[in-house]
Image (cartoon, rainbow, N blue to C red):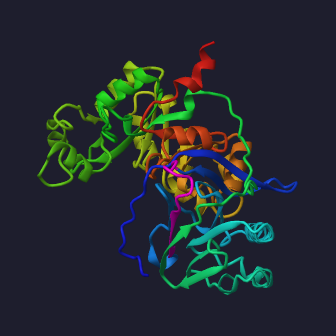
């Protein structure tokens, strides 16, 4: 079934466990693991439906699986879903596209599951075949005929829930819905939990676009700064973009600003036009002067910029360059900032584009901060651990972009591997209690 135009609806899930698997003495980390308790049914013997949606690289859509009321988007590679019962699953994504170790570990776990007569399913997202080619004989021996010959940029789903291995492969996309047997009892845990320890600190939390106010995100408004400062944030991200007459202002993007303000004129507006409008009629927008006034009045607050990529000009115009950290989006801008003593967060794209030793580059350019999407954690855990061990603070964005992946989820499952997050809401009082003792 081709799904290129299908709109998937993802529902809320309750996450109990998070882990990362460590391989041997090298402590090399391969991927994320989750154990999920499905919402209790009225009867423990009621069967559930497993939905598998696999997209190849060419489909340009996110693959996913759903069981009962739980849906999860998957990362690049092959995701293995193990059923402890019909209501409890654990799963892990193996980036077999880029990691030979991930392919070896996957095959080893599949052999254990086959030997133990476990119930499980698999699906591919994006590409998975590159390092599975070296595992052809082992996969054939376990009767994974189609997986053994899968090509990169192909979709794939598999399950053995009816007692036999069922496989499908397609160049673009696959959808399969299968009934999960009601009576599954398997206490084996294939993906045990490892807990990352970390010290509480207020600088782990950046108020995304000024932070949420009255349920509204991304306003970049004065009231958002005021409200979230009172709640506890001390690091504030603002999106800095340019008006038609070349003036810098705080707004996420012009289309969003127009929706927020009911503005129907030409975009971008002039500075004068920008200043005439309030967000939803209540929230005051900020030009550079307004930004400077607010940070001058809050001397313990730090500004994190987004979107602006001219470090020298912006730093010269900011009220206190010591309380400025600029997320930058090209190696040229990063090196320019480094040479002029401007604190820099290197963004995901230039970080991953660095050729050679990334840690050496960051050290040479005195870069102490990194910003990446939390969606890439599973495929870049080794790098994240190296950055952590080097003392570089990694902040993740895209919090609240995926169902269930909110501030509390990131706090409980990902802080420690990464340093902090861009958060919409302040939910961290309980985590910081020890700081006030």
Q: Nearer the viewer, residue 102 or 38?
A: 38
Percent coordinates x, y for residue 426 in the rendering: 45, 30
Please report the residue visible at 19 percent of the width from the left and 31 percent of the height from the top: 282
Q: Residue furthest right?
A: 25
Label total for image: 0
Above or below 52: residue 390: above
Q: Nearer the viewer, residue 60 or 350?
A: 60
Picture quadrant of residue 149: bottom right
Whether residue 158 is visible to the viewer of this picture, yes or no, is yes
Residue at the extreme top of the image, as rendered: 437
Left or right position of 173 against 167: left
Q: Horizontal placement of 292 versus 196: left or right?
A: left
Q: Could you say where residue 67 lies in the image, as x and y percent from the top left? A: 51, 60
241 lies left or right of 274: right
Q: Where is the C terminus found, in terms of image quarters?
A: top right
Residue 43 magenta-highlighted: yes
Q: Quadrant of residue 21?
A: bottom right
In the displayed structure, 258 sits above or below 272; it is below
Q: Nearer the viewer, residue 13 or 323?
A: 13
Q: Quadrant of the N terminus?
A: bottom left
Magenta range is 39-55
């Amino acid at each position: 079934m081709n799904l290129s135009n299908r709109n998937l609806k993802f529902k809320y899930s309750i996450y109990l466990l998070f882990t990362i698997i460590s391989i041997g003495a090298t402590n090399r980390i391969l991927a994320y693991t989750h154990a999920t308790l499905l919402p209790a049914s009225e009867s423990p013997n009621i069967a559930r439906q497993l939905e598998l949606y696999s997209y190849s690289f060419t489909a340009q859509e996110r693959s996913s699986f759903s069981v009962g009321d739980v849906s999860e988007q998957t990362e690049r590679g092959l995701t293995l879903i193990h059923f402890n019962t019909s209501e409890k699953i654990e799963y892990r994504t193996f980036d077999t596209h880029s990691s030979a170790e991930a392919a070896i570990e996957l095959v080893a776990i599949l052999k254990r599951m086959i030997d133990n007569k476990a119930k499980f399913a698999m699906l591919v997202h994006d590409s998975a075949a590159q390092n599975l080619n070296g595992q052809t004989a082992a996969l054939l021996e376990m009767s994974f005929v189609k997986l053994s010959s899968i090509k990169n940029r192909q979709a794939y789903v598999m399950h053995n829930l009816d007692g036999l291995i069922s496989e499908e492969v397609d160049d673009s996309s696959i959808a399969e819905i299968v009934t999960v047997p009601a009576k599954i009892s398997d206490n084996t845990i294939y993906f045990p939990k490892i807990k990352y320890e970390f010290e509480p600190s207020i600088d782990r939390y950046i108020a995304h676009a000024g932070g949420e106010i009255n349920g509204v995100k991304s306003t970049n408004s004065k009231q958002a700064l005021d409200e979230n400062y009172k709640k506890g944030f001390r690091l504030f991200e603002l999106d800095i973009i340019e008006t038609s007459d070349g003036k810098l202002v705080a707004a996420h993007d012009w289309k969003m600003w127009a929706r927020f303000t009911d503005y129907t004129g030409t975009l971008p507006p002039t500075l004068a036009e920008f200043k005439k409008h309030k967000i939803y009629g209540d929230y005051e927008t900020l030009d550079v002067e307004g930004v400077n006034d607010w940070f001058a009045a809050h001397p313990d607050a730090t500004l994190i910029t987004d979107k602006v990529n001219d470090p020298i000009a912006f730093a010269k115009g900011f009220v206190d360059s010591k309380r400025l950290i600029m997320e930058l989006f090209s190696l040229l801008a990063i090196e320019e900032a480094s040479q002029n003593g401007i604190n820099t967060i290197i963004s995901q794209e230039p970080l991953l584009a660095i050729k050679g030793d990334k840690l050496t580059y960051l050290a040479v350019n005195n870069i102490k901060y990194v910003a990446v999407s939390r969606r890439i954690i599973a495929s870049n855990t080794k790098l994240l651990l190296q950055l952590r061990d080097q003392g570089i603070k990694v902040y993740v964005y895209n919090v609240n972009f995926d169902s269930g992946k909110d501030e509390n989820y990131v706090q409980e499952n990902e802080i420690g591997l990464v340093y902090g997050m861009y958060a919409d809401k302040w939910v961290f009082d309980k985590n910081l209690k020890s700081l006030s003792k």
